[in-house]
Image (cartoon, rainbow, N blue to C red):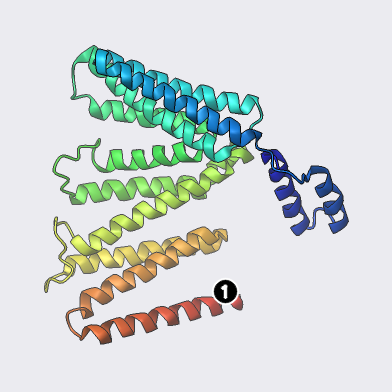
């Protein structure tokens, strides 16, 4: 069955479940788009395209053994990112529906474009100290490509790149030694990304960008909570101090961790956003587990410790299930 037919049949079944079309209409329309054979053409085309790309890359690398230079590397990256965009455009013009392949091609091409920018910059300036500026330019280009191509993978790379760029003060990760300043930077940027997600700014750009809001929400929540979790274990040190006797600092961080999740849980309930609610509950439970390890791991026998941990996990699951059932 052709990929287009599969997509149409999937949508028809979805409409039937949503009572948009009746069972009879589903049966009539399904017969129109249903085939009793496998359409191998898209598969063959994909295999051929990948094969051609691999041969081309192999040939380029073969030549590179003889004319290896920065100029050739720049040419190689340029050829790779341009070929990716061209292949994606060909797939669309030929109406070959391969969304996952398309996302991967554009994501790889965007990465090659970023590498090309760094290489060309070094050829022109012979300077490696402009890494911070070039990183920001690459991130901006990722955002532009993501919105033009409506590519979720590139958008995720752009958002993660932006938060990391700002959190590490321009990717200055030499000797990665996180400080309170870095933590605050990560949290502020994470909150900003999360707010973009819940305000549905992307939806205002059109329905085709609606899922972008979900990506902003997920990455924003993850960054905020991961950083707060790290703070509640390490404090401002480079080694865990979770089992130290004097850990008032961790107590403050764990309270902030809990408060942030309670706030996001309330926001999720108000917006009736199950995704935000699920992540908030998950990190509240994670915080409880971290504190449980902190205060009881060294105080009781291992079998008692893990038995209590397991029973409490089951009880939490039962409580959540009952809440959902009787909501």
In the figure, 256 relative to 9: above or below? Answer: below
In the figure, 17 relative to 41: above or below? Answer: below
- Image x and y of residue 24, in percent: 88, 56
Q: Is residue 144 visible?
A: yes
Residue visible at 50% across and 76% down? 320
> Which quadrant does the C terminus fall into?
bottom right
- Image x and y of residue 93, in percent: 64, 24
Determine whether, in the image, residue 309 is placed left or right of residue 214.
left
Location of residue 307 by image quarter: bottom left
Residue visible at 49% across and 63% down? 277
> Which quadrant does the N terminus fall into?
top right
In the figure, 73 relative to 175: above or below? Answer: above
Q: Residue furthest left?
A: 245
What residue is pinned by disc 1? 324
Q: Residues within 10 Å of mark 1 (few under 14, many from 20)?
A: few
- Image x and y of residue 84, in percent: 47, 26
Location of residue 22 by image quarter: bottom right
Residue visible at 32% across and 63% down? 257
In the figure, 223 relative to 313: above or below? Answer: above
- Image x and y of residue 90, in percent: 59, 24
Q: Nearer the viewer, residue 302 or 155?
A: 302
Q: Is residue 148 visible?
A: no
Determine whether, in the image, residue 77 is placed left or right of residue 96.
left
Residue visible at 16% across and 56% down? 236
Label count reads 1
Determine whether, in the image, residue 206 is placed left or right of residue 180.
right
Which element carries disc 1, helix, strand or loop? Answer: helix
């Amino acid at each position: 069955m052709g990929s287009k037919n599969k997509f149409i049949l999937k949508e028809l079944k979805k409409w039937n479940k949503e009572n948009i079309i009746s069972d009879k209409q589903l049966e009539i329309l399904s017969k129109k788009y249903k085939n009793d054979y496998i359409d191998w053409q898209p598969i063959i085309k994909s295999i051929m395209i990948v094969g051609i790309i691999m041969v081309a890359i192999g040939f380029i690398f073969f030549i590179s053994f003889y004319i290896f230079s920065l100029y050739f590397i720049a040419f190689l990256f340029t050829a790779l990112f341009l070929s990716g965009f061209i292949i994606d455009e060909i797939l669309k013009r030929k109406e070959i529906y391969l969304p996952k392949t398309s996302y991967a091609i554009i994501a790889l091409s965007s990465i090659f474009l970023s590498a090309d920018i760094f290489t060309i910059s070094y050829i022109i300036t012979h300077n490696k100290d402009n890494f911070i500026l070039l990183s920001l330019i690459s991130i901006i280009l990722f955002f532009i490509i993501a919105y033009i191509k409506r590519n979720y993978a590139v958008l995720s790379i752009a958002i993660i790149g932006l938060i990391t760029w700002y959190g590490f003060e321009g990717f200055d990760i030499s000797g990665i030694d996180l400080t309170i300043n870095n933590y605050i930077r990560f949290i502020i940027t994470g909150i900003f990304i999360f707010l973009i997600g819940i305000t549905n700014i992307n939806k205002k750009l059109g329905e085709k960008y609606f899922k972008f809001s979900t990506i902003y929400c997920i990455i924003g929540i993850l960054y905020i909570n991961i950083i707060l979790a790290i703070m509640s274990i390490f404090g401002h040190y480079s080694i865990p101090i979770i089992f130290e006797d004097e850990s008032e600092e961790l107590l403050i961080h764990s309270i902030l961790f809990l408060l942030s999740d309670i706030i996001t849980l309330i926001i999720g309930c108000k917006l009736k956003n199950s995704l935000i609610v699920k992540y908030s509950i998950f990190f509240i439970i994670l915080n409880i587990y971290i504190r449980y390890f902190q205060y009881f791991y060294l105080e009781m026998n291992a079998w008692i410790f893990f038995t209590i941990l397991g029973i409490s996990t089951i009880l939490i699951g039962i409580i959540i299930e009952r809440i959902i059932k009787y909501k």
